[in-house]
Amino acid sequence: MAIFSVYVVNKAGGLIYQLDHYAPRADTEKTFSYPLDLVLRLHDERVVVAFGQRDGIRVGHAVLAINGAEVNGRFTADGKDVLEFLANPANYPVSIRFGRHRLSSNEKLMLASMFHSLFAIGSQLSPEAGSSGIEMLETDTFKLHCFQTLTGIKFMVLADPRQAGIDSLLRKIYEIYSDFALKNPFYSLEMPIRCELFDQNLKLALEVAEKAGPFGPGS
Amino acid sequence: MSRQAGRGTESKKMNSELFTLTYGALVTQLCKDYENDEDVNKQLDKMGYNIGVRLIEDFLARSNVGRCHDFRETADVIAKIAFKMYLGITPSITNWSPGGDEFSLILENNPLVDFVELPDNHSSLIYSNLLCGVLRGALEMVQMAVDVKFLQDTLKGDSVTEIRMKFLRRIEDNLPAGEE
């Protein structure tokens, strides 16, 4: 049972807090000799596996590091183009780390704003008057739960589909926000939350919710 | 400083005299800084506003009240839940205007003014003006523009403290989704 991430979006739709809580993904690092038996291509400024699958490396995985040094988009750490580097037999044997690409903070900002707009669509599409916005988004690997306060702040939690007790977790996160973010006089409203205490207490609350497992927290 | 889930009546006890002293120190320092009662009143209102915009989230998180559908419901929630939660008193609601958009809160005792006497040279000082700002700020965050002022004040010789609240308009910009 796991809670994957928490997002807090302000009234205007801007992301003011984000926490990733899941265990680090299993990245695969392997040594390869020329020629590479995976087909790589450029996608969205990243080098991804287009075809080929072995040892935990799947289609869609991105090149995360070469010879231990993290790549910078399509360029290696020292500025060479990754695809050119890997096409040159002189650079082999080479150790490449593959893994699923993690969202950058800009991407998270964009996705949060997009969700903010979608949330409104939920209430507009409704056949009944006065409907709330989107409360839950379900996929086969996670459920996104969203709670909007009367003041317009949204708290979103991405969790395992079997995880229960998310509603009370969302209320608890609201309390933690009203305590450790709002009662900090140096925190300005609607701005990104950079409060240590908020982080710590949020992580504690997530752990409590996870331990309770699929039956929800005991009261 | 961890909180138990469901605080309820088990709130952290703090000496209310410390609160009275703190508020008093605040007002007297403002009087020294600004010299002019009107400015002090304005500052107290501003400070109250900043408190109100934060306090509303704490109130909503703990009390779990839903959105109020009219001003009467709002008045009830303010008097019976909010004042009780934060100041430990329950003012009574009276003097509704015929249009239902104005009412008075009557406070028998005001914890901010325990032991306080207003001197003659501060006759136009509204000592508890912070409360007006708090109410204004809190309601603004739930899309209600209100005007709040003191009509009677025990510090000025009246028998009770009366706060008059008037509903001005609904704040339509930046409405959260689903409230139309």
Image (cartoon, coloured by chain):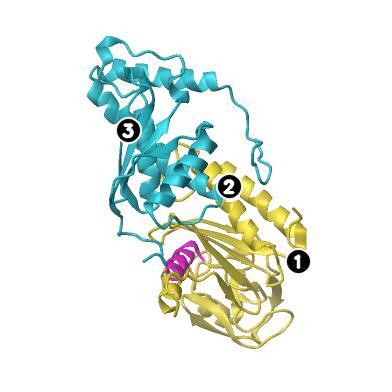
Chain colours: A yellow, B cyan
- Residue behind mark 1: A214
- Residue behind mark 2: A176
Residue at 31% x, 24% y: name it: B126
Q: Tell me the mark number nearer the camera, choosing from 1 and 3.
A: 3
Report the front residue among A168 and B112: B112
Residue at 66% x, 40% y: name it: B3
- Residue behind mark 3: B45
- Bounds of the magenta segment: A104-116
The answer for which chain carries disc 3 is: B
Residue at 58% x, 22% y: name it: B15
Type of the residue with mark 2? Ile
Quote the CA–CA distance across marks 1 and 3. 48 Å
Quote the CA–CA distance across marks 2 and 3. 27 Å
Label 2: element kind? helix
Type of the residue with mark 3? Asp
The answer for which chain carries disc 1 is: A
Report the front residue among B25 and B130: B130
Q: Is residue A207 left or right of A89 when viewed as pictured? A: right
Label 1: element kind? helix
